[in-house]
Amino acid sequence: MKKFIAMLLALVMVLSLCACGGSKTETKTETKTEETKTEAPAAEAPAEAPAAEAGKTLYVMGPTPDHGWTAQAGAYADAKCAEITAAGQYKAVYMAASSGEEQVDQVNTIVANGDAVGVVMMALDDSAQAGQETLYAEGIPFISFDRIIEATEQYAVLNASGDNWQCGAGIAYWLQQNGMKAGDTVVTLYGDNGTVCSRRQEGFEQFLRGEIKYSDAATGESYETTEVWEQDALDAVFNTYSVVCNWSADGAYAYVEQKLDEIVAAAKENGNKLYIYSMDDEMTFGVLNYIEAGASEETKADLEAMEVYISAIGGMQELYDVMAGTDEQSALADKYFDNMMSMYFSPKMMQDVIDTMLTYLSGDWNHQQGDGEYQPTWIVNRENVTEYEGFKGHA
């Protein structure tokens, strides 16, 4: 009996030792597996690029590239954003829109993203004001480009554009040099009702009132009016034959289709001179296109017999080609326009303004909030057009 009990105890001890050995092996295996799972992802995780870090995105807001000056401004901005992103310090995103309301929605998206280091905004119309107010309220620095909204310009770290006052002054100087006097028949083609055109009107009036000079950035020369105009004569320029063309050739075409016979008849009775203050290259093309395709033979004969001078602003290569005599419409322009010109106003300046925002972000900044910075302009006409390269954009 004692022998049996001793054997039974020995068997129990052997079984206990086997069970303990199995448990130890299992625990060791599980620990090794967990260590492998933890270490492998840490070794494989890529380093995050600086441009992807929160607070490192530069947003540039502007027009949907379609035609003309705005198309090129948008294309230049998009290319600049790609260049900045490739450099790596910031991610730069171009956000295209077709209205100010759409830009307000885009600002809300920017705020929600929470990664904006700064914004460059080319407001498409005054309804974008709410977007600029939001940027200011959220503490996101922004530069207002080209179309300056007066209600929010004090919120911008800078308001930047071409010098629209000098565009107006330059055209007034040029038309006056070509014989325009107070009381002559003048047609005014506006792009829109925003600050771009209102400042071009102000510059025109200020020059003819003798308040400012026209300073030509290409020649370095400054010019003053040879005849000071009274306000009633200036009012007639902007209240008799004037229209908003929405920056398009089609808009100008539609207006002259309706009014050119009347305008030409009035000019024929008023010294046989006609001056057209067009505030954009596209709208100048609209006038030329109507003369080519829609004007009556009688009206064209009257135009040919009178002195006609037409302006533009921008710098489209297509218009430069017309002035240079190398375009299919050059002969038409030579026949009906005694001279034509375009104030240089390149859409490439949008890239310069984006560079200005990078300067602001670097801390190298000498402006006060709400300041304005305006790029110089100059006259390009038939006499000097071959000296300049324009931008492609006419549709």
Image: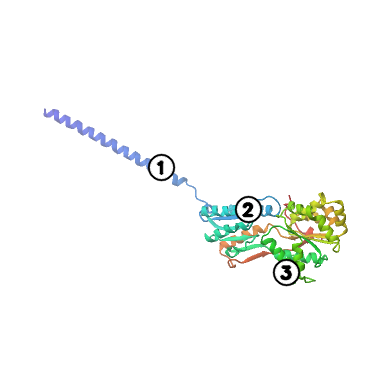
Sequence-earlier tag: 1 or 3: 1
Sequence-earlier tag: 3 or 2: 2
The image quarter containing residue 214 is: bottom right
Q: Amino acid at mark 2?
A: Ser
The label nearer to you, 1 versus 3, is 3
Q: Nearer the viewer, residue 264 or 75?
A: 264
Sequence-earlier tag: 2 or 1: 1
Dot 2 lies on which element?
loop
Q: x%, y% of residue 183? A: 81, 66
The numbered disc on residue 207 is: none
Q: Residues within 10 Å of mark 2 (few under 14, many from 20)?
A: some
Tag 3–tag 2 contact (CB < 8 Å): no
The numbered disc on residue 37 is: 1
Q: Amino acid at mark 3?
A: Gln
Q: x%, y% of residue 289? A: 79, 51
The numbered disc on residue 206 is: 3
